[in-house]
Amino acid sequence: MRSDRTFPCRLASPLRPPAIEFKRDNLQMHCLRKLHFVCTGLLLLSPALTLEATQQAATASSSTPAQDSASKADQPDKKKYSHADDFLIRGTVFNEKALSFPAVELRFRKEGQKKYKWETYTNSRGEFAVRVPQGSNYEVLVHVKGFADQTRMIEAKGGGNEETVAFRMQPVKGDKK
């Protein structure tokens, strides 16, 4: 399906419009030559780029074992924390009608400390769970606007690694709930 229509050269410089028009066959040949030239150039450059990247990687990792041990001596080894010895405090919070209570704030702190260290909220079913280190007693504060705060002590010193608790919140006197 040949056509005798002529097309302007699409690959001409944008600064100077093409002075002549090529037939379709000439245009296709011109595009193929340019494509061949570009591909050949890329093939010739790729081994040089690969060699250069390899040399840079080799110089970056060419430190001696003595240098490696000296650099490791400067940095203290981080002790990895394991949750195997943690104590799990979990439970459920209910409202005055014994229905699950979502979005209740719970705060946890070690016995004798002023600031609360852990904080969580109950899920849509009124449930919560928090991992704390074993070996201490923990105070749990349950807080909801319009309800009286509740606190409870949890013993996490030994004999198991989890405790399940339940809270039933009571509305504050004079509150319209």
Image (spheres, rainbow, N blue to C red):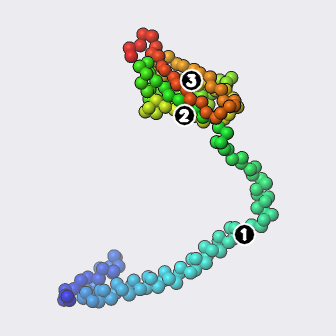
Residue at the (76%, 61%) spot, across then down: 68
Tag nearer the camera, 2 or 1 = 2
In the image, 74 versus 132, the foreground residue is 132
Kindly identify which numbered label has been placed on residue 129: 2
| Kind of residue at badge 1 | Ser
In the image, 160 versus 61, the foreground residue is 160
In the image, 47 versus 77, the foreground residue is 77
- Within 10 Å of disc 1 (Cα), the crowding (few <14, some 14-19, many 20+) is few
Q: In which quarter of the image is the N terminus?
A: bottom left
| Kind of residue at badge 3 | Leu
Indicate the secondary structure of the residue bearing disc 2. Answer: strand
Is residue 81 depicted above or below 151 in this figure?
A: below
Kindly identify which numbered label has been placed on residue 95: none
Kindly identify which numbered label has been placed on residue 62: 1
Residue that numbered label 3 is attached to: 141
Residue 98 percent coordinates (x, y): 43, 22
In the image, 63 versus 115, the foreground residue is 115
Residue at the (24%, 83%) spot, across then down: 7
Give the mark nearer the N terminus: 2 vs 1: 1
Q: Give the distance between the C-alpha atoms of the residues marked 2 and 1, in whole angstroms.
A: 49 Å
- Quarter location, residue 85: top right
Residue 103 percent coordinates (x, y): 45, 29
Is residue 119 depicted above or below 66 in this figure?
A: above
- Quarter location, residue 23: bottom left
Tag nearer the camera, 3 or 1 = 3
Residue 36 percent coordinates (x, y): 41, 86
Tag nearer the camera, 3 or 2 = 2
Give the mark nearer the N terminus: 3 vs 1: 1
Residue 77 percent coordinates (x, y): 74, 50
106 sits to left or right of 12: right
